[in-house]
Image: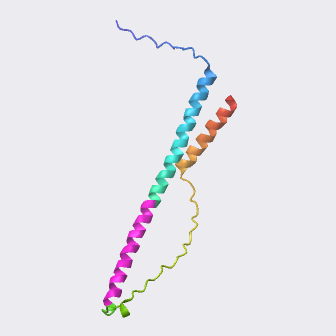
Amino acid sequence: MNEKKPEQELYVHVKKPSELRRNILECSQDVLTSMQNLDKIQQVRKQKVELMNKLKVQVGEINLLASKLAEHLPDYHFAPKDGKQVKLEPKKKTVQKKVQEKKTGSSKSVDVKSALQNVKGKLKKLA
């Protein structure tokens, strides 16, 4: 009784198909760019966590060494002579910047880059 009819193909007329295609490709390009930015943010966050952990360990070591030093030093309180207080000027420290080598991107970022280049190429063909 209930016979299944084969599905009929349905065609819809699209006005200005090249403009629609261009809009879709531009949106794809925006999505891929956002994915690249997200990947960079995740890498920075990961580096931040690693550096914070290293800093925590180093601060712990410094506190341990400072307490050991305080144990070995004699107790002595300095009294100012003639009621004058001597002010010491802080010395300027030079900070050395470390140059970090850029790590090669993960395969995920490589895929995103190639997809982005592919979309850009298609956009140029449409223009």
Q: Percent position (x, y) of residue 107? A: 54, 50
Q: Is residue 98 above or below residue 41?
A: below
Residue under the point 42% across and 86% down? 86
- Nearest the eye: 89 or 27: 89
Examine the structure image and report whether residue 54 is included in the region drawn in magenta: yes
- Tell me which colouring the rendered structure shows: rainbow
Q: Percent position (x, y) of residue 72? A: 33, 91
104 relative to 52 in the view: left or right = right
Q: Quadrant of residue 121?
A: top right
Q: What's the magenta region?
A: 48-71
Residue sticking out furthest to the top: 1
Quadrant into which the C terminus falls = top right
Q: Is residue 112 above or below residue 61?
A: above
Examine the structure image and report whether residue 56 is included in the region drawn in magenta: yes
Q: Quadrant of residue 122?
A: top right
Q: Is residue 40 above or below residue 24?
A: below
- Nearest the eye: 92 or 23: 92
Q: Is residue 65 above or below residue 96?
A: below
Residue under the point 39% across and 88% down? 84
- Marker count (numbered): 0
Quadrant into which the N terminus falls = top left
Q: Main secondary structure of the magenta part?
A: helix
Residue under the point 36% across and 90% down? 83
86 relative to 79 in the view: left or right = right
Q: Percent position (x, y) of residue 123? A: 65, 33
Residue under the point 49% across and 55% down? 43
- Nearest the eye: 115 or 95: 95
Q: Percent position (x, y) of residue 16? A: 62, 19
